[in-house]
Image (tube, rainbow, N blue to C red):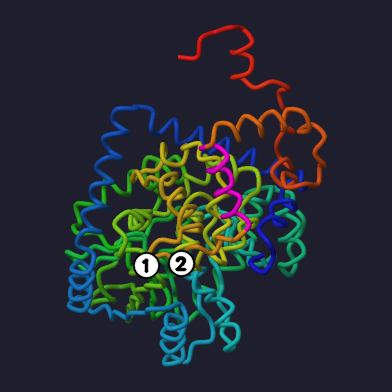
């Protein structure tokens, strides 16, 4: 999708009636579930304030905590690798796989691995990467990317999933029974868990105090990926570190409630070391790959670093009036929805992804439900300003990319017109006479594409006041 214009992607999504129907059904359920689990408004606000404080504290000490995490993990026997770019991260993962002569990797859900485009990279080197999260498994069968941070196949309904299984899984019958679809996926994946030499996962939180990697899930596939294969590779963005183990309970409560409307997720996996002597399961090696990919640059800006508070719950997507109508694929990048609109332009640059920041009504719903209180609308406005700014360079790549001579001249003309009263009266009077006859394909063509055509009054307010004999005070 990324090689096509965002506008074309949006037009295609809006024209897909089935897609919009699927999203309308799914998003409504997510909103109701979240509302039920966070029914006490005052308690929820206190919990969000606590979550915000925990992430703010971690970010305020980020360099120190990352060093502390590395030291603690190393003491525990976890091998830590640093990757400035996705290319370096991919190479590190490949080297680990090749050192064990493994031909297959089973993967738990990981948005960072999507950010790395790891599956395609490994495929080029003859290594099979098998997605084991059910949603990821479905879209991998269909050759797609995730449409949602938490529910990758949310854009598919039951009949569409049934058809994918029937066509892509050898010997699978067509069935729309959920239990039977789950059984097909389970039978297909069970053998791959045992045959894979490498298990790969993401990381929801990494505890600097203890060197513990925390993973949450609902299906058990993540636990299989991190215990059955002899080697476990965890990949994470550097912002996932938290200071103390006691920070986890409130963050987990916020994450699971916001993501799926659960009081607690089914599986909470805490990994602090490889298998130790006397233990009956677990990998013989654990590797942690910590990815930067522009995050340290974002961290340099006191306002924009709030982007890094995100816990990847996806609730901002569920409440966004834009995302719920166009779906995740229309954005053309790994992270869709409100969080994608502020993260992607900062990582990819405003020239490439700056249009995403303008795909918002600024209604504020995302900020109202964000479990860690990221001020997404304010950050969107900041990125919009950066797109046109001529001020000294900031940390945002591609700033000023939307500035052009015609627009600068137009705004200067507007200022001049509105600071000279006589000229303003003449222009207003002229517009009142000819405004309704302006050609539809003129300068307002794109603006009127989604708006009603403006009507122009034949007389200005000042003119009417003067005619009524009202004193101009």
Q: What secondary structure is the magenta-colored segment mainly?
A: helix
Residue 94 image position (x, y, % from top left): 47, 86
Residue furthest front as drawn: 422
Spatial separation of the CA atoms under disc 1 and disc 2: 7 Å
The answer to whether residue 465 is above or below residue 182 is above
Q: Mark 2 and mark 1 in contact (Cβ < 8 Å)?
A: yes
Residue annotated with mark 2: 347
Q: Could you tell me which secondary element the residue under label 2 belongs to?
A: helix
Number of numbered discs visible in the structure rendering: 2
Quarter assignment of residue 2 = bottom right
Q: Is residue 408 rendered magenta in the image?
A: yes
178, 319: nearer the viewer = 319
12, 70: nearer the viewer = 12
Within-10-Å neighbours for mark 1: few <14, some 14–19, many 20+: many
Residue annotated with mark 1: 295
Going 21% across and 58% down the picture, which residue do you hit? Answer: 60
In this picture, which residue range is highlighted in magenta? 406-419
Relative placement, left or right, of 21 versus 351 is: right
Going 32% across and 54% down the picture, which residue do you hit? Answer: 303
Residue 426 image position (x, y, % from top left): 66, 32
The answer to whether residue 89 is above or below residue 187 is below
Going 55% across and 49% down the picture, which residue do you hit? Answer: 412
Within-10-Å neighbours for mark 2: few <14, some 14–19, many 20+: some
Relative placement, left or right, of 356 versus 230 is: right
Which part of the image, by quadrant, shows the C terminus?
top left
Residue 120 image position (x, y, % from top left): 59, 78
The disc placed on residue 186 is none
Residue 61 image position (x, y, % from top left): 19, 62
| N-terminal label among 1 and 2 | 1
Which part of the image, by quadrant, shows the N terminus?
bottom right
Q: Could you tell me which secondary element the residue under label 1 belongs to?
A: helix
Q: Is residue 311 rendered magenta in the image?
A: no
């Amino acid at each position: 999708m990324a090689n096509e214009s965002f506008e074309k992607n949006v037009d295609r999504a809006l024209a897909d009636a089935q897609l919009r129907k699927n999203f309308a059904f799914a998003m409504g359920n997510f909103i109701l579930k979240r509302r039920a689990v966070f029914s006490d408004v005052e308690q929820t606000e206190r919990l969000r304030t606590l979550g915000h404080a925990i992430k703010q504290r971690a970010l305020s000490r980020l360099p120190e905590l990352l060093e502390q995490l590395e030291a603690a993990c190393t003491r525990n026997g976890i091998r830590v690798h640093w990757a400035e770019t996705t290319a370096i991260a991919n190479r590190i993962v490949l080297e680990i796989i090749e050192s064990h002569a493994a031909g297959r990797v089973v993967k738990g859900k990981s948005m960072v691995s999507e950010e790395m485009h790891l599956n395609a990279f490994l495929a080029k080197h003859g290594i099979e990467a098998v997605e084991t999260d059910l949603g990821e498994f479905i879209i991998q069968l269909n050759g797609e990317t995730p449409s949602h941070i938490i529910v990758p196949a949310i854009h598919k309904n039951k009949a569409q999933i049934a058809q994918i299984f029937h066509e892509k899984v050898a010997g699978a019958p067509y069935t729309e029974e959920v239990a039977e679809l789950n059984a097909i996926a389970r039978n297909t994946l069970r053998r791959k868990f045992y045959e894979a030499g490498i298990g790969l996962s993401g990381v929801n939180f990494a505890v600097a105090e203890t060197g513990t990697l925390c993973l949450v899930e609902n299906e058990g596939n993540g636990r299989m990926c991190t215990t059955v294969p002899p080697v476990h590779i965890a990949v994470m963005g550097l912002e996932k570190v938290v200071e103390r183990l006691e920070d986890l309970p409130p963050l987990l409560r916020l994450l699971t409630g916001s993501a799926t409307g659960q009081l607690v997720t089914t599986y909470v996996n805490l990994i602090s070391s490889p298998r130790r002597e006397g233990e009956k399961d677990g990998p013989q090696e654990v590797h942690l790959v910590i990815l930067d990919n522009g995050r340290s640059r974002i961290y340099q800006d006191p306002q924009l670093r709030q982007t890094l508070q995100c816990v990847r719950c996806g609730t901002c997507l569920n409440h966004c009036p834009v995302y719920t109508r166009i779906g995740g694929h229309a954005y053309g990048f790994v992270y869709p929805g409100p969080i994608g609109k502020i993260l992607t332009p900062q990582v990819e640059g405003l020239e490439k992804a700056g249009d995403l920041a303008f795909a918002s009504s600024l209604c504020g719903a995302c900020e109202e439900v964000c479990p860690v209180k990221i001020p997404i609308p304010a950050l969107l406005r900041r990125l919009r300003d950066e797109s046109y700014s001529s001020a000294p360079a900031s940390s945002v790549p591609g700033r000023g990319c939307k500035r052009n001579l015609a627009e600068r001249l137009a705004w200067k003309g507007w200022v001049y017109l509105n600071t000279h009263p006589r000229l303003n009266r003449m222009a207003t009077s002229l517009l009142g006479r000819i405004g309704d006859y302006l050609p539809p394909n003129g300068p307002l063509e794109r603006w009127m594409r989604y708006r009603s055509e403006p009507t122009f009054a034949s007389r200005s307010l000042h003119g009417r006041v003067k005619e009524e004999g009202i004193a101009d005070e």
